[in-house]
């Protein structure tokens, strides 16, 4: 082999090795950035879930009448915050004496919704749900209870208190909730409740993006399934609805 041929071979070898190194660095960079982005998005989704759960706990004071207003902070990090009206629960209360349906009402709920990179967290009817990849889980249950002595249904609906219907920002916002209305749906002044009476409370989820999570919640907390209804056989029943008006402060 001549000197020129050896020189050409060395140059080609260098180019070949250099190309492999550049390609390897590029592959590592692309995969590394993708992994870091996925990890960041997953952590932001978990942060939003924790913030909404803490927010729901704070706003329990509103439906319990302990305070007229409460506030909580959430970091949006490029996600969007909005109020949506997609949830309806139908509640029926039936007493055996007198033998008549004493309540048949559909509760329509506005929900506070956070969306980020395909993940959704919803504060819905007092519960918190997380959705990702088509599935939903209950992050915090609603203020419902089913027992032999009493059934309790306390639901929260969300409305916007002015301002934009949807918000998107990279920073944190302060959510302020105020009690707009509170109604004791059942019993009313004209509805007698006697501990000797048999009372059945029935709930069906007429509409919700988290109907599967609602189903798992009812089935795991003492409610019996009867067709599309979930029933609680008890002696006394309380159904309450609270409407919370939300405003957002940067």
Image (cartoon, rainbow, N blue to C red):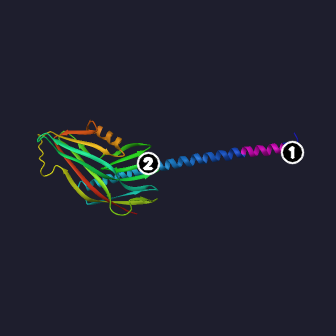
Which residue is at the front of the view, 218 or 57?
A: 218
Write the residue at 24% across / 47% down.
Answer: 153
Residue 201 vertical position relative to residue 114 in the rendered view, above or below: above
Q: Residue furthest right?
A: 2
Mark with earlier residue (1, 2):
1
The mark found on residue 119 in the picture is 2
Point out the image quarter for the N terminus.
top right
Asked whether, in this view, residue 22 is left or right of residue 232, the answer is: right
- In the rendered image, residue 107, in percent from the top left (x then y), is placed at 26, 50
Residue 220 shows in the view: no
123 with respect to 236 (left or right): right
- Residue 215 drawn at (x, y percent): 32, 40
Q: Is residue 63 above or below residue 139?
A: below
Q: Quadrant of the C terminus?
A: bottom left
Q: How many marks?
A: 2
Residue 198 quadrant: top left
Quarter of the figure with residue 21: top right
Residue ID at (41%, 49%): 120
Can residue 35 be seen here?
yes
> Which labelled disc corresponds to residue 223?
none
Report the predominant secondary structure element of the magenta stretch.
Answer: helix
Residues in magenta, as a range: 6-17
Which sits in the foreground, 228 or 157?
A: 228
Identify the residue under disc 1.
4
Is residue 200 within the magenta segment? no
Q: Secondary structure at mark 2?
A: strand
- Magenta stretch containing residue 13, yes or no? yes
Looking at the rendered structure, the secondary structure element under dot 1 is helix
- Distance of mark 1 from mark 2, alpha carbons? 62 Å
Query: Between residues 112 and 70, which one lies in front from this camera angle?
Result: 112
């Amino acid at each position: 082999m001549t000197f020129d041929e050896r020189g050409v071979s060395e140059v080609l070898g260098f180019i070949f090795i250099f190309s492999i190194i550049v390609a390897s660095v590029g592959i590592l960079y692309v995969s590394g950035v993708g992994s870091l982005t996925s990890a960041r998005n997953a952590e932001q989704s978990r942060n939003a879930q924790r913030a909404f759960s803490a927010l729901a706990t704070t706003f329990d004071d509103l439906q319990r009448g302990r305070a007229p207003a409460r506030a909580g902070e959430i970091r949006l990090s490029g996600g969007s915050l909005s109020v949506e009206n997609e949830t309806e629960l139908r509640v029926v209360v039936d007493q055996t004496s007198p033998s008549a349906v004493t309540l048949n009402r559909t509760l329509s709920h506005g929900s506070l919704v956070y969306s980020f990179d395909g993940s959704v967290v919803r504060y819905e009817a007092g519960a918190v749900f997380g959705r990702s990849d088509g599935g939903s889980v209950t992050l915090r249950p609603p203020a419902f209870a089913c027992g032999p002595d009493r059934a309790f249904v306390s639901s929260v609906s969300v409305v916007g208190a002015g301002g934009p219907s949807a918000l998107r920002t990279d920073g944190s916002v302060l959510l302020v909730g105020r009690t707009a209305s509170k109604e004791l749906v059942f019993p009313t002044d004209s509805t007698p409740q006697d501990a000797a009476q048999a009372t059945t409370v029935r709930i069906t989820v007429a509409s919700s993006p988290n109907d599967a999570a609602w189903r798992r919640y009812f089935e795991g907390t003492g409610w019996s399934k009867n067709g599309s209804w979930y029933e609680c056989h008890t002696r006394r029943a309380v159904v309450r609805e609270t409407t919370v008006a939300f405003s957002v402060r940067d």
